[in-house]
Amino acid sequence: MSEEKLDARSSQGFINAAQAVEQHFGDQQDIDTQGGDAAGRDIHKSTIINLIVPNGDAGLSQQLLQELMQILGQPESVQSVGKAYRSSLPPDARVSRPEVDTSSEIVTQLQAFGRLQEFVERLVQDEQLPQSMRDQLDNLIPHQRKPQPTNVQKQPMLQAYLLMVLDPDPGTDRFFANAWLVPDDTVQDPLTRFVPLDLEAEQKGVSCSIEQISALIGEFLIQSEDYLFDRTDHYNLTVEVFLPRDYLSTEVESWKILDPVDDQPFSIGTKYSVLVRSYERTQRKYLRLYRKPWRTNWDRVKQNLGKVPSHEMFEQLDCLEDWTERMLTTSLLTKLGLKLTCSPAAKHKEFFSSILKAAVPIAIWSRCSIPELDLATEMDALLMSGSLLELLERIRLKRWEASGDCEQHLGQHLTILWEDLDRLPPVTELLRPGQ
């Protein structure tokens, strides 16, 4: 077989022969190939043929590859091809938005990554494609390399996070908003763990007022959902909002986005687990002094995530009148977190300063007092009706129950602070508009 190289755009051969049925899958984006083919366009003929027909006859192999290109070029395959392509990319491809391209360029790119057969196999499993087309694709996979039938296993649920950081603009009541998506929380490599979300192509950070944040988070949620949707159907997205200390009681879960079905607004806290985090804890000057006790406290939480919390695991604070910072710090030395059964409004700044100094990983409170409601009993029911790991989902359901005008429902006022030290945004990249 010839060792010459085929150019995916202009060479004479299987790709050129199939250009009549070429489909376009959208705008091309740059991909970091992590040391792969820098040009991303030259295909070694024997290599790409052997991906599908190992040691096959050259003429027969070209015929099969032409069949692949013709299948990819059929109108009903466009959506499935794009999704299979993005799902077949390796995790370190580092695409911030789904890359889509023509069918020949898709084959070229996947060959460079060594993912062409996986791409074909994904198409074979796609029930959105006609069975006849799936059968044709199945015939292109070498029989000896086809996976043996196994018991169908449930695809694991990816835990994803939208991190939105509000950096205060000194001397004003405005913020600079930056956001990142963590598509899979099990990925720890800092180079691939965070996907930056930008609302403007050449600009990092968005200047906004507190009233404008609701619209911004709606845009960030759209970007996050699009990214995840193009890669898997099995994911859970949690929203984390990093707020300056003075804003930690902001009703972030009540920020509204529009339902795509009827364009009616709904609170994000009814669909997503929404929690607050401290902006100060992202800053190096805080981490220098408090990272060690925070690590100790968070590791204690991790050891108990699968357990049902007991009364002793959370420090209960019923009144802020006689409370002191030293008392709180001392009482939390062996606790997982804090439950505040009164409103923090009376000593807002002092209370949250103490939370930061004590490096408390979890705190739960109601933003206001609710007449005829026993907050301690209600919070205990939330904390102790399941494992600590499932607490955020229980709070989301409590908020969903309170949707509407139910002002006497705890879910309407409930705030959860959840400070995971292992999931901090790359704050060194925090930029303001124009930088």
Image: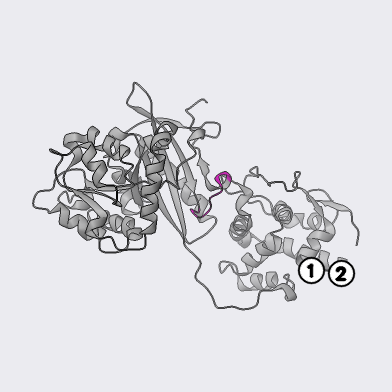
Q: Secondary structure at mark 1?
A: loop
Query: Among all residues in the image, which is located at the extreme right?
Result: 2
Q: Are marks 1 and 2 in contact (CB under 8 Å)?
A: yes
Q: Is residue 325 above or below residue 183?
A: above
- The stretch in magenta equals 184-191
Give percent across and percent down for residue 241: 37, 42
Q: Position of residue 56 (x, y in %)?
A: 84, 69
At 79% across and 60% down in the image, what residue appears?
Answer: 48
Residue 53, which numbered label? 1
Would residue 189 be counted in the magenta stretch?
Answer: yes
- Cα separation between marks 1 and 2: 8 Å
What amino acid does circle 2 point to? Answer: Asp
Q: Residue 27, image x and y in percent?
A: 62, 44
Q: Which residue is mark 2?
A: 57
Q: Left or right: 420 with respect to 95?
A: left
* Neighbours of disc 2 within 10 Å: few (<14), some (14-19), many (20+): few
Residue 348: quarter of image: top left
Residue 90 sits in quarter: bottom right
Q: In the image, is residue 261 above or below residue 63?
A: above
**Residue kind at label 1, given as amino acid type:** Val
